[in-house]
Amino acid sequence: MIILKEREMSLKIKVLEALSRRLPPSNHMLLRIKSDLGKNIAGFKGEESLHYYLDLLPEVEGEFYVLQDIRLPYKGHHFQIDTLLIFPTFILILDAKYMKGTLEFDPAFQQLIQKFTENEVDKTITYSDPIIQVQTQLTKFKTWLKDYKIQPGPIESLVVIANSRAEIKCISHPNLVKNMVVRNTGVELKVAEFMKKHTKVKLDAKGVRKLSSLIIKKNEPVTFIDLEKDYGVSPDCILKGVQCQKCLHIGCERIFGSWLCQKCNNTCKEAHIKLLQDYRLLIRPTITVSEFQKITGIKNERTARRLLLSSDLSYSGNTSQRVYF
């Protein structure tokens, strides 16, 4: 097994984490933002948990590749694949879900119903059917391959429930759910079944490498989250100030070469680095000295410039009109 593309924490998680730090508690979107952050982190954990079980996959003749977190262009839009396994005899798409409680699959009405108890309150949430989602990924991937005149042979797909404590139930179409839904502990057995089912080599070693390289080349990760469109958050809503790395209070002051928290008296020399990271995620990827002074409260221009230079940022322009990246 060769992991050609490893999974990375998504831009959306990084942006939502920064946003949850940088919005005032009174902001009416903060609850939804934290909820979305929790869902995205849970999804990431589910996808990450697959790694252990992929290591247990049976050996095959010839190498096979694992590509994680793929986003490919499709008819003016994009489609995503959590985990893609390219074998010489078949291809497998895995879509991992890390969900707690009782999961009731209902393909007849294209839905998944989640029931759980949180803070002694019973909750029920209805989602789109993940079986249909992964089947849609498969259909789009087949069309994408045809556009490049590639015929890789059979393509299978599975929904993987990554939370071992979740209870799986079926409301309708039990055979479909049984065939399409598996716990992460069952991925190894499912792959073994597919290997027995698909024995004819469709891609030789060179073909497997070539297809994998093409997918990596055409992969287009998300590079921008529209906060104003998605959450109604404009740059004016973002809290300015250096955050204390101990108590998380925003509003540290630069005193004697360190950032002093006015709330807990903790000091830190490089607390402004986190602020720069948040600024890049929430505002823009460039900053000027005057903008840096505004968000940090530093009054001395020379001090602000020195801190930016010491942060190992690249820049362009002369001293007076310099832009830092």
Image (spheres, grey):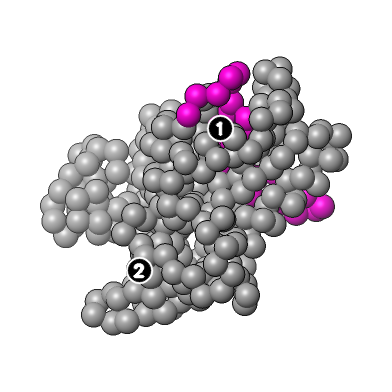
Left or right relative to 273: residue 260: left
Q: Which residue is drawn at 24% across and 45% down?
A: 259
Label 2 sits on a secondary structure element that is loop
Left or right relative to 25: residue 190: right
Q: Quadrant of residue 247?
A: bottom left
Three-letter code for the amino acid on which mark 1 is drawn: Val
The image shows residue 5 at horizontal and vertical percentages of: 55, 31
In this view, the residue farthest toward the left is: 265
Q: Residue at x 62, y 55 (%)?
A: 134
Q: Which numbered marker is on residue 285?
A: none
**Which residue carries the number 2 mark?**
101
Instruction: Report the number of discs.
Output: 2
Q: Residue at x 58, y 28 (%)?
A: 65
Q: Residue at x 37, y 51 (%)?
A: 296
**Which residue carries the number 1 mark?**
66
Q: Can residue 82 be seen in this view?
A: no
The image shows residue 251 at horizontal and vertical percentages of: 28, 57
The image shows residue 293 at horizontal and vertical percentages of: 42, 49
Q: In the image, is residue 264 part of the stretch drawn in magenta?
A: no
Left or right relative to 168: residue 78: right
The image shows residue 41 at horizontal and vertical percentages of: 41, 55
Viewer-proximal residue among 166 and 294? 166
Three-letter code for the amino acid on which mark 2 is drawn: Gly
Quadrant of image for the C terminus: top right
Magenta region: which residues?
A: 58-87
Viewer-proximal residue among 204 and 264? 204
Asked if the residue at tag 2 contacts the one at tag 1, i.e. Cβ–Cβ closer than 8 Å, the answer is no
Left or right relative to 156: residue 57: left
